Amino acid sequence: MKQIFDRIKNILKSELNSTDSNDFFDVDLDNDLKKEFENLSHNQKNDRKSNFTIDIDEQMAFSILEIASDASNDEIKRAYLSKIKEYHPDKVQNMGKEIRLLAEQKTKEINEAYNLLRKKRGF
């Protein structure tokens, strides 16, 4: 959102500094802003896709959930719920973008680990 407002500010500055007062706001703000928003949305989607590809094995899944490899199904579920509560992105929604992205990545990692163990154990 900040980037959109920065773009608006830059458009306004360039128009205000224009030497020809008849050309004031000659630029199509709606189209410029729409293009800028689409670029930002596209870049964020690409960033998320590239940042969240995870390939884990069973041992890594136990490590992510911080449990022993001989843990029962109930222990796996409890560890999963505990980790999700700790790292869920909603808990850090008021913090900076970097913190939110890290929380999203960690949550994705926890979910991948839990789903892998569920498939392996059949629960």
Image (cartoon, rainbow, N blue to C red):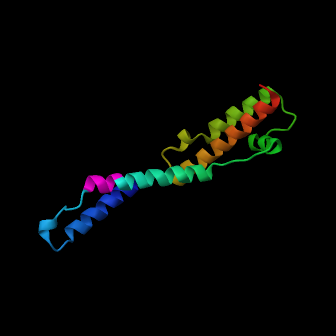
| Residue 112 in magenta stretch | no
Q: Quadrant of residue 63?
A: top right
The one of 42 and 74 positioned closer to us in this rendering: 42
The one of 106 and 123 positioned closer to us in this rendering: 123
Q: Most prominent secondary structure in the magenta stretch? A: helix
Magenta range: 29-34
Residue 65 rendering spot, x and y as whole percentages: 75, 40
The one of 109 and 80 positioned closer to us in this rendering: 109
Q: Residue at x 20, y 67 (%)?
A: 16
Q: Quadrant of residue 72?
A: top right
Q: How many marks?
A: 0
Residue 108 rendering spot, x and y as whole percentages: 64, 42
Q: Residue at x 75, y 36 (%)?
A: 116
Q: Is residue 42 above or below residue 21?
A: above
The quadrant of the picture occupied by the C terminus is top right
Q: Is residue 96 visible?
A: no
Q: Quadrant of residue 24?
A: bottom left
Q: Is residue 63 visible?
A: yes
Outermost residue toward the right in this view: 70
Residue 122 rendering spot, x and y as whole percentages: 79, 26
Residue 94 rendering spot, x and y as whole percentages: 48, 45
Outermost residue toward the bottom in this view: 19
50 left or right of 64 in image = left
Q: Is residue 44 above or below residue 27?
A: above
118 left or right of 47 in image = right
Q: Is residue 82 above or below residue 49?
A: above
Q: Residue at x 68, y 44 (%)?
A: 109
Q: Residue at x 39, y 57 (%)?
A: 3
Q: Is residue 63 above or below residue 96?
A: above
